[in-house]
Image: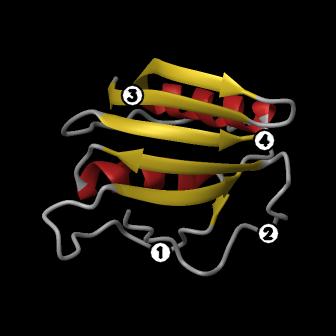
Amino acid sequence: MNDTSSPASPDVSPDSPDLVHVMLAECSPADADAVFEVLGAHFASDRAGVVPHRGESPQPAAWTGSFRVDHAPEQVAGVLLAGPVTADLQGGPVAVDRLRKTLAEAFAVEAAGMSAGDQEVDVQIRLTSA
C-alpha cells in the first residue's frame, strides 16, 4: 500500500465520529488525485499538499487519507475520471454518509458493499465520471 498522506492530521482525535478514513484503489494516480482534491476542497485532511505519485512499482496498491467530515458541503462540482475508482470509507455513520453524498455530487457512485458496527461503518463504493 502506498500511504502518501502527510504526518499532519486533521484537527480531530482518532476516535472522533467526524473522522473518515478513505482508501482508494484500482485507479490511476491522476484519478486518485482528482478524488482527493474534491474531498480536500470541502473537508480538513491529513493530505494537505500531497499528490498521489508512482513509486517503484508501476502502480501503488492504494492511496489513503483521513478527512474531518463535520458538515455537509453546500455545492460540489462534478469531476471527470479517466477510469473507475474503488473507494473504501471507514468512520462514524453520519460522517461516512456525508462524505459519500459529497462524492455522489462529484461522481457517479455505485455501492459495492457495507458493514456496520455500533459506532463505525465500512462502506465500499465505485466512482466513475458523472
- Mark 4 or mark 1: name the one nearer the start of the chain: 1
- Mark 3 or mark 4: name the one nearer the start of the chain: 4
Residue drawn at x 59%, y 23% is 114
Q: Residues within 10 Å of mark 1 (few under 14, many from 20)?
A: few
4 or 2: mark nearer the eye: 2
| Residue 119 position by quadrant | top right
Tell me if label 3 and label 4 are in contact, CB under 8 Å: no
Vertical comparison of 112 with 118: above or below: above
Q: Which residue is mark 4?
A: 71
Which mark is on residue 126? 3
Q: Where does the C terminus fall, quadrant-wise?
A: top left
Q: CA distance from mark 3 to mark 1?
A: 25 Å
In the image, farthest residue toward the bottom: 7
Residue drawn at x 51%, y 33% is 103
Which mark is on residue 94? none
Q: Is residue 56 left or right of residue 50?
A: left
Tell me if label 3 and label 2 are in contact, CB under 8 Å: no
> Residue 53 location in percent, x, y?
27, 69
**Which amino acid, by three-letter code, is at mark 1?**
Gly
> Residue 41 location in percent, x, y?
56, 54
3 or 2: mark nearer the eye: 3
3 or 4: mark nearer the eye: 3
**Which amino acid, by three-letter code, is at mark 2?**
Asp
Q: CA distance from mark 3 to mark 2?
A: 28 Å
Badge 2 marks a residue whose secondary structure is loop
Tell me if label 1 and label 2 are in contact, CB under 8 Å: no
